Image (tube, rainbow, N blue to C red):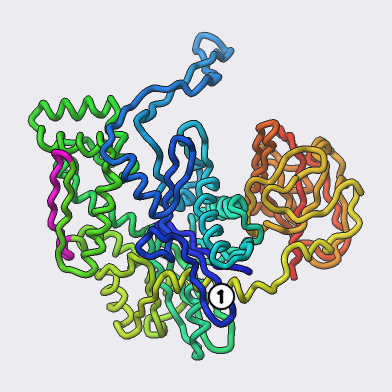
Amino acid sequence: MRLGVDFGTTNSAIAFYDGHQLHTIRTDPANDNPYVMPSLIYIDRELEATVGAQAASTYLENETGRPVRWRHREAGEIEVTVSSLESADPIEFVQSVSVLVDEAANGRLIQSIKTALFNGRYEGTRIFNKFYRVEDLIAIVLRQLKTAAERQTGEACTSIVLGRPVQFSPNPMIDSRAEAILLKAAYLAGFTDVQFELEPVGIAYLYHRDNPKRETVLVFDFGGGTLDLTIAEVGGNHAPEILATRGVPVGGNDLDRRIMASLLPHFGGGDDGTLPADMSDKLLAWQTMPELSRPRYLERIHRLKRNGHAHTMQALETLISNNIGFKLFKEIEQAKKQLSENDVTTLAFDFGDLHLRETITRRRFDRMITSDLALIRDNIDQLMQDAGLQTNQIDVVLRTGGSSLIPAVRHMLADIYGDDRVRDIDPLISVTGGFAVVAHEIGTQPTHASRLDVVTEIIPPTYRLHPLTVNTPLYTDRDFVVSRIPPALNGLPAVQPANQDYESDDLEQLQFCLNQPARIYIAYEGTATRLPNWLRTFEPEPMRIEIEDEIALIRRTMQVYGKDFEPGLVSLGGSQAAGYNGDIIVNYVAIIDPLN
């Protein structure tokens, strides 16, 4: 059984399609909608993880109202090298490192972990005494979905179509890295057969299945983290055809921050406030609010309190010292939702001596998000240009995602395309259901494993061919395994060499025969300063493979290069053949992708 999975910034869901009926999985009985699981993780001091609605309630119960206590804790030692003006020789010494931690914390709440994929440098976070990589945290959510599916279906669920945004980043290297992290997370969760599909494509595919007439549709998927836009031709007897896609870096969470920005004057912040900008910025996210309770910030707050700003600084101190930021942002989110139904709402929040009352009209909220609306409008215009279409050529606008319910967004789409062409679709049915349909229809396609016969007669004969996947051994003689791999390469046949040959300067180190045209990818260590001459005929690809030896605690990054070959003999040189320069400790790996 192959299922469709929507891992979202705010919520996640899983479903399957049996060819006749869509079956949604009951993932979170504690949630208002038990078929949707909030993408929340709470990890306590025993490193036990709670997921979904229960994670939020556990966090509120254990953390809200408790004092924040910062303490320096020794984190170990590092070697430091500095240059001296008096001497040409660098000075080396060992320095102790300490970190500031909140010792009163009972646990840690992780929200919007999907947004970490948009950051090309973020690796993860330390929670108490354990470091969690991004894929470790995402795997906790995906594992919960898998468990729920197996409980409901009574079958092992290892094959999925997993949704992803149109664009994690305009930088193709960051985009490839994000997808590789998501793939690793799926493997860690227990899924062994993973295929990706763009989130708006899933929506278009579900609409295609039920539409006998060919139409041009615009999918407007506005979730908590991003807005994805897609124009596609769907319906009739032909497969869906994607004409254009765009990812817009704005989501519902950004709109929540706009409301929080309007509340800053209550805490001495904002353009006319007394609070410095670097401190005001930390109030725009509940995760960074507690940082203001650190001693160096508290000293500034107390000084401002003594200098005539007692009321606002007391409100600020109550906010940051009692860990109530998450609770406040939950009220902000509710106010935003109420403005989708009403012209005015009152945001009321009480805790201790903090009593917040703020009347927000829909017109005022629209002004708060003016820049976001302008960005959305510009991207819609660009999407139409990308597709080469005029607005009257769009037959239907499929609007989905919680943020698409905002009246200003609805009015924008109606103004552009006409109210009669804009339709609402339940995000659970449209996104997750679309992936489930795609999963069902591709379930009979051959896997990468069936491509192993693309290569014959490998020399040296001690090298062997195997599917390259996460956690598979990279070499015949070294304990390096693949820790992250771009999905475009996942499962492809790869030659498993001996790592001891990494010093080879032979011009014919590796030879094999192709029985059909193929693109050969070479994963070569990224620390080399010059490539060997034979590899310079390959094109750099926006992809990297990360490998690690958990026994020796070594991690390396392999840059990928590609070149097309016709059937016949392929001869590749050694890692240190003529032209090479640099410092490498691992051999390259050849990966084969049949072109047909």
Q: Is residue 538 left or right of residue 138?
A: right
Q: Is residue 383 above or below residue 248?
A: below
Residue 242 percent coordinates (x, y): 53, 75
Image location (x, y in percent) of residue 306? 11, 26
In the picture, the quarter occupied by the C terminus is bottom right
On the image, the x and y values in percent for residue 483 come to 64, 45
Mark 1 Cα shell of 10 Å, populated few (<14), some (14-19), many (≥20): many
- Look at the image and say whether residue 357 sits in the magenta stretch: yes
Q: Is residue 450 magenta?
A: no
Q: Which residue is mark 1?
A: 17
- Left or right of 106, for residue 334: left
Question: Which is nearer the eye, 154 or 270?
Answer: 154
- The residue depicted at 18 percent of the width and 65 percent of the height is 362
**In this picture, residue 455 sits left or right of residue 303:** right
Secondary structure found at label 1: strand
Magenta range: 352-364
Q: Confirm whether residue 52 shows in the render.
A: yes
- Residue 203 location (% of width, % of height): 47, 73
